[in-house]
Image: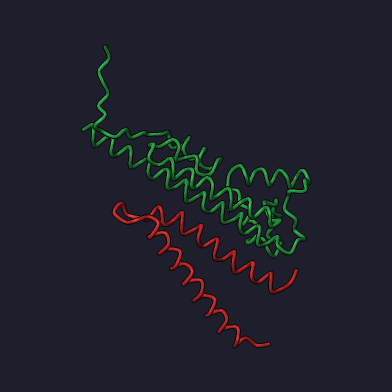
Chain colours: A red, B green
Amino acid sequence: MNLSLFGILHIVSAIVLTGVVALVIGLQEAEPKQHPARHVLGCWAKMLGGLLCIGLIVFVLSLFSCQ
Amino acid sequence: MPPARDTSQPMHLHANPCLLALLGWLVPGSGFFLLDRKYRFRGILFLVVIHATFVAGVALRGGAVWPSWSFADPSFIVNDLTFLMQMLGGWPALFSLGAHFAGWSIAADQAHTLYELGSFYCLVAGALNYFVVCQSLSRNRRAAVERLANNA
């Protein structure tokens, strides 16, 4: 398989799976007065932001790795 | 003539927690069908989402594979924990494991490049089912408490 396609598939999978997780956890956490869809989208955005931060940290740390 | 039911109060169903947990594990999302009617849409949503996630994992040639259960195996923790989490997915995970033992074409292909990604999808489906079962038990307990409060 093409490495670029492999990487894109993993990135798309990360986005889809965080969406699925945000849906389940967000529906549980949503208060009765809150709009559940808005809360789920907010959870999704936070999770993607967290993944992006972790990815950046891993990338920066990899620059200091001894090769 | 039997007395008319008081329809001004919502009907709070109180399902057997063991049955709720077992059914909710076996068929992801089905625990909510034993609760009040207002949770039915949520049950259908979780049923579709979790099944779709597991099917996506199987389509990527992932699935449940019986681990070695050996401490000497360097990937002991990853493989065994992955298996346990996948098994939380209920009947799809049991079917995938059965397919692995039977050698069917739909079984996980450990040599495939997308096997690990597919298995991760199945792992996520199992973990989500765990959360969904916990949610249904929590709603059931809340309904029982509300019913006791209404009867008091």
Give the quadrant of residue A26. bottom left
Residue B37 spot, x, y in % from top left: 39, 36
Residue B81 appears left or right of A51: right
Give the number of marks: 0
Residue B125 spot, x, y in % from top left: 56, 53
- Name the residue located 57 percent from the left edge and 81 percent from the top edge: A59
- Name the residue located 77 percent from the left edge and 48 percent from the top edge: B105
Name the quadrant of the N terminus of chain B.
top left
Query: A29 above or below A47?
Result: above
Query: A62 above or below B26?
Result: below
Query: B75 above or below B92?
Result: below
- Name the residue located 34 percent from the left edge and 56 percent from the top edge: A35
Residue B141 appears left or right of B48: left
Residue B16 appears left or right of B119: left
Asked whether B126 or A15 is in front, the reply is A15
Residue B80 spot, x, y in % from top left: 64, 56
Residue B132 appears left or right of B58: left
- The single residue placed furthest to the top in the displayed view is B1
Name the quadrant of the C terminus of chain B.
top left
Residue B146 spot, x, y in % from top left: 28, 39
Asked whether B22 or B122 is in front, the reply is B122
Asked whether B120 or A27 is in front, the reply is A27
- The single residue placed furthest to the left in the displayed view is B152
Give the quadrant of residue A3. bottom right
